[in-house]
Image (tube, rainbow, N blue to C red):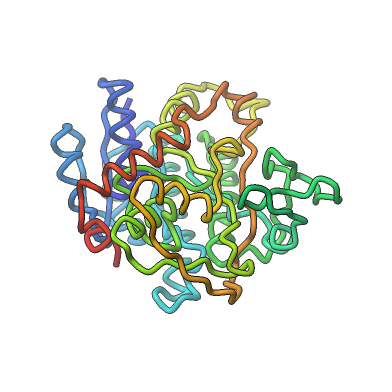
Amino acid sequence: MKILVTGICGFVGSVLARTLREIDPALKILGIDNFIRPGSELNRMELKRRGIEVRHADLRNASDIDALPPADYLIDAAANPSVLAGVDGQTSSRQLLEHNLCGTVNLLEYCKAAKAGFILLSTSRVYAIEPLAQLPVRIANGAFEPDTARPLPPGISENGVAESFSVQPPLSLYGSSKLASELIALEYGATFGFPVWINRCGVLAGAGQFGRADQGIFAYWINAYLRRRPLKYIGFDGTGAQVRDALHPADIAPLLLKQIEKTSQSGVPRIVNVAGGSDRSMSLARLSEWCAQRFGPHEVAVDRTPRPFDIPWMVLDSALAAKTWDWKPRQTLTEILDEIAAHAERHCNWLETSSA
């Protein structure tokens, strides 16, 4: 079995490649990356040490992708993963779409030619932002939770957001680019006869994640707290009660292997949520408490100004993945946080190394 992994030198791509090789040493894994993110070179060296081939290629360039050898499956772990991408002044809207949407088309053309299966790692940000931003919530133990005494939007419960939740825009340019990629991937698979699986991921977290406030929030917060960097609770009255769930990307690998081994897609959901769920969720305020217990006190500032695209509570319900694939996360939230903290303690300059 030959597998092509895009974005292999990013946090998620590198963890998946290493974990897949650990589960099945017979897998032949080739990875591509454009190496534009700080920290990518560190992952490249580690992958090379494990015998995983890595090539330079930019998925925005069709000629780069067309020159790759055929594979049996392609796992797309490459993306600009920030919800603020295209509007934050760091990247343009055109750059975002070229990377997240046009790049997907180039990969699908590759799968069409090679008759390779396609697995897209998508995002919780494909879900409609307005009903999420207006979700009735209450604060319990320093964290928002859905107020079940009031009517909740269809497709959401105390267990999280299900696949049936609205994907009606506005979503953010990032979310729309990923939703469009999902639709195009399903169309390509149906038209040209190759399997397509889409996994909508919540917040992915673990040691070695590139730390930025708009992306790897758990890794960023722990590293910044340890180094006594300025931190802020932004919006939501400065409570820090906003909640996200966490999933270690290594826990996705067994699911991907099941999808790769599936010989028929008939009657099987193509799209599933893959996330840590409610029992692996935490607010920023609770994360600060965890950090204080491990590293000692550090003051967190307050900025009550609302931030674009922010929502009080985002937890994904992965019940469909559990039912369809007998999948569930393995690593607990405490294990994930401990792993990040231990890495932060060993790498004092990680924020400078990994962030632009």
Residue 318 higher or lower than 62, as above or below: above
> For this view, does 143 lie left or right of residue 226?
right
Q: Position of residue 213 (x, y in %)?
A: 42, 62
Residue drawn at (31%, 55%) of the image: 226
Q: How many marks?
A: 0
Q: Is residue 260 left or right of residue 243?
A: left
* Residue closest to the eye, 119 or 277: 277
Residue 161 pos. (x, y %) = 68, 45
Please, which residue is most extreme toward the bottom here?
A: 89
In this view, the residue in front, 65 or 220, is: 220
Tell me where residue 269 appears, x and y as whole percent: 64, 32
For the point 59% across and 57% down, the residue is 242
Image coordinates for residue 67, horizontal then vertical, percent = 26, 49
Q: Nearer the viewer, residue 3 or 271?
A: 271
Q: Along the horizontal axis of the image, is 46 left or right of 64?
A: left
Q: Furthest-front residue in view?
A: 297
The residue that appears at 31% across and 37% down in the rendered structure is: 70
Answer with the quarter of the image where residue 20 lies: top left
Quadrant of image for the C terminus? bottom left
Q: Quadrant of the N terminus?
A: top left
Reply above or below: 102 against 159: below
Depth check: 87 or 308 in front? 308
